[in-house]
Image (cartoon, rainbow, N blue to C red):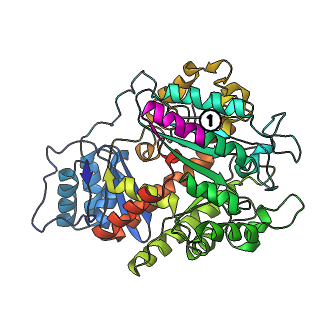
Amino acid sequence: MTVRGKISSAAPPAGECTETKGAPQHIGEAHCFEALGQRIVLNVATSLFYAVNNVAFELVEDAPGTNWANALRRAKRRFRARDVDDAAAYLEREHFLGLPKKTSPPPSPGLRPLSTLELCVTHACNLACRYCYGRNGHGDNPLYGSAIAHMPVEVAIKAVDLFWAGSGKLKELNLTFFGGEPLLNLALMRTVAEYCHAKEKDTGKKIHFSVATNGTLLDDEAVAFVREFKVGVQVSIDGPAELHNRNRSFRDGTGSYDSVIAGVRRLRAGRKTRIPARITAAHGAMDNLEVFRHLTDLGFASVHIEPALGGGCNGAELTAEDVDELLRQEEAVARYFVESIHAGRYANYHGLVRHLRDTRVVHDRRRHYCGAGRGLICVSNEGGFYPCHRFVGVKEYCLGSVETGIEHAGRHPFHALHVDARPGCRECWARYFCGGGCWNHAHTAHGGLERPDEEGACRLLRRQIELAMAVNAALDVPDQAVISGIYDETTLPHLKA
């Protein structure tokens, strides 16, 4: 593990130079970009990045299209020869020259044990969000193609047993209650939590609960359940009232913002509770900076903005022009983020902070975007297993049922399709920071898992990674460490699967 610390300015000590004669004839895999007023180069082979001066930047940018000697000669027509030699020495010292394209070793052929279960305790919902993908072509009924709403108790118990059996020797497990709106079936959630606690005593394992909720049903009974079983709560809220109500109304058309805020206040009453917020950026309703400011002012521990991409969003999915606008908005948020930290205000903008941590400290290379189909599995209200909640009802990705068992063989593609094996990923500079993007975005864009969503999700992820590097370059080491810690504290278990 290499800790970057304060990012180097790439201005080498005076007097250091390199001779062009005998120098390596090519530069290794690199990426150059500009963000937040800085010019940054990434060494893909080492996963290290540097804020650099114009000379070093243009050398790295120019070298892939020519041999190294020609790049140096061309640079010396634009800059002082001494500056070019100093920059070349710096780049060679930082291993930009001559390194072959880096790939990760193939993943282990064995399946990972299951660590996280998403339990769709109901497919019913009390809201009619305009981008809801759960409607699945069935009009206003958000049942993901299901014939029933609530999950029967016997389905939940069988699902937990199969998940437990698939966890192998793992001692720490996670269970997320999902929907629809899961609090519509609070009775089943309590039954499952009590059953899991009994299994903890029998097996020596420990399970952590979380719930993804729209927040409108956080009444006294729901809050008591959350506190009794120490359930982590993630609330879906789309920002200020006007924007939120445009997206997330009750089924009679009235806005849900006031009910969400009342539920959050009830949850916080009497104790400190770190509540992450999840936002959907949809066509006609995007203002990331205003949303971030509003939700952090309300005290949400983190803000995660998910773009409405691909089909199934009932006409609310982002257009190509929307994606362009989101890229501009992401930079505006990054600038505000840096300004806030310099003023002593720390916050967690999830899409930025997750990459701040990963680009600051070189951990193992990320070969998969998430744990879907690998450490994570989802069960629908009818008892069908799927790679994650986004695939529920997509029959070609069904992984068995509570009656027949989990079809573990169907999980193999999610292990084998790492970034070095996927078209569109294996040549991308961001592959080891990104991990390949959401499987469901790939499916909706191309009808399969192999190719990522290059025109939508990939563009956003690459820019977020670039902005994270630029933010790291603008922060002192203590601030970088604080931000990394904030991410770890507020990330829900199912996001780590």
Q: Considering only vertical position in the picture, is 281 above or below 393?
A: below
Q: Does the image show residue 33?
A: no
Query: What is the quadrant of residue 136 in the picture?
Result: top right
User: How far from the left and from the top, in percent, is residue 115?
Assistant: 48, 36
The magenta stretch spans which residues?
Answer: 194-206
Left or right for 116, reference 151: left
Residue 414, compared with residue 172, is above or below; it is above
Query: Can see residue 161?
Result: yes
Residue 76 screen position, x and y as percent: 25, 61
Is 246 drawn above or below residue 92 in the view shown?
Answer: below
x then y, percent, for residue 412 = 52, 23
Q: Residue pushed farthest bottom?
A: 343
Percent x, y for residue 17?
A: 12, 59
Left/right of residue 89 with respect to residue 183 in the rendered view? left
Q: Nearer the viewer, residue 378 or 453?
A: 378
Residue type of the residue flagged with mark 1: Cys
**Left or right: 116 as drawn, with respect to 106:** right
The question of residue 474 being in magenta is answered with no
Judge left or right: residue 205 versus residue 83.
Answer: right
In what element is the residue under mark 1? strand
Q: Residue at x 37, y 54 (%)?
A: 359
As for residue 199 lying within the magenta part, the answer is: yes
Q: Main secondary structure of the magenta part?
A: helix
Observer-nearest of 261 and 376: 261
Pick whichever, 371 or 21, lies toward us: 371
Residue at 72%, 31% in the rendered image: 394
Question: How many numbered discs sit on the rendered protein?
Answer: 1
For the residue carrying disc 1, how many other residues have a C-alpha within 10 Å: few (<14), some (14-19), or many (20+)?
A: many
Q: Residue at x 65, y 69 (%)?
A: 266
Q: Which residue is mark 1?
A: 378
Q: Quadrant of residue 356?
A: bottom left
